[in-house]
Amino acid sequence: MALLSIILPSYNEEQNIANTAKVLAGLLEKEQIDYELIFVSDGSKDKTYEEILKAAAENPKVKGAEFSRNFGKEASIFAGLQIALGDACIVMDCDLQHPPAVIPKMWNLWQQGFEVVEGIKSDRGKESLGYKLSAGLFYKVMSKLIKMDMNASSDFKLIDRKVVNVLLELKERNTFFRALTFWAGFRTTTVEYEVQERQFGESKWSMISLMKYAITNATSFSTLPLQLVTVMGVVSIVFSVILAIQTLVKYVMGTAVEGFTTVILLVLIIGGLIMVSLGIIGHYLARIYEEVKGRPKYIISKVTDNVQGNIVGKA
Ligand code: UDP
Ligand code: MG
């Protein structure tokens, strides 16, 4: 019988673990799907891991791991994929904002032969203005670049074992799970779902962390900002040639341009452009530096006894 692994990244979710484990176990038993639940505590500061241990004691199909510190949601997803033994894996939030009722649908599509089942948010209207200006804007640009609707797509998806293995073999440190399944290809379909309200605890994303996430992902998936630097350079060269000719002509005709204002404006504008360009290049350099060091994406400090295989930090 095929095994389904459900991967649940969890950061400070002590209030959610028990309930989520119960809801999912109930559903999957009713649907007669063989499953395992993998909770990856992302260096939680509350009792999340203790809650996972409790859930595992009650249900042997619950597995868990704890990170040595907070490494971010991407890292917890990848640790979960590493631990998973399933023929198919579903990644979902452990606050049940991704409705469990979609799981059987994904499972059926997988049994029909689809290797990637993308969860697509059907209700996208009520995002805040701040979101629309930052992450939302970024997703629009990204959507154009990689030809997928980033605003509607999410981390809620089912992936086949083949795809899991492809993702686990990627050497990059700065991963972007949401887009990587598109990049990987395979036989793909979608299911729509409605994002639920969070019942317990609060969202871990601040405006700043969303912005950071957006920038990291933009630079890990596209080199367009670097090309933008070149474009800015070319545009200012064209302008300077025109301005130089005009200035020289005026000079020869004896009516030189009124000096200081023009000069100070030019110096400031060009100076600004140069600094921004250096910043962009610096950002890519930092990314390369991080990748070259080749440090692991995460460090696991603890795992539950039922976790198999050679997992880093396993006792
Ligand atoms: N999460 C995580 N590490 C983090 C932040 C969040 O593993 O550093 C998990 C979190 O526990 C949840 C999921 O990622 O299961 C989505 O986070 P959250 O619900 O806070 O985000 P939102 O739903 O508001 O976008
Ligand atoms: Mg949430």
Image (cartoon, rainbow, N blue to C red):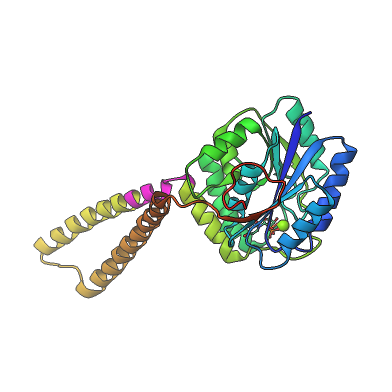
- Most common SS among magenta residues: helix
Q: Check the image and report above or below for 138 versus 275.
A: above
Residue 71 appears in the rendering:
yes
Q: Where residue 279 appears, x then y in whole percent? A: 37, 60
Q: In which quarter of the image is residue 10?
A: bottom right
Q: Which residue is drawn at 55% across and 47% down?
A: 176
Tell me: 265 left or right of 78.
left
Q: Where residue 292 appears, x then y in whole percent? A: 39, 49
Q: Quadrant of the N terminus?
A: top right
Count of marks placed on residues: 0
Q: Residue at x 62, y 54 (%)?
A: 73
Q: Where residue 83 appears, x then y in whole percent? A: 65, 44
Q: Check the image and report above or below for 58 versus 181.
A: below
Q: In which quarter of the image is ligand 2?
A: bottom right
For the residue pair 314 and 244, the one nearer the viewer reads as 314
Residue at far right of view: 30
Q: Where residue 128 appears, x then y in whole percent? A: 67, 62
Residue at far bottom of view: 260
> Which residues, given as a range, are shown in magenta?
221-230
Residue at far front of view: 315
Q: Is residue 229 magenta?
A: yes
Residue 118 appears in the rendering:
no
Q: Quadrant of residue 87?
A: top right
For the residue pair 237 and 127, the one nearer the viewer reads as 127
Q: Is residue 24 magenta?
A: no
Q: Residue at x 72, y 40 (%)?
A: 5
Tell me: 49 left or right of 299.
right
Tell me: 295 left or right of 257.
right
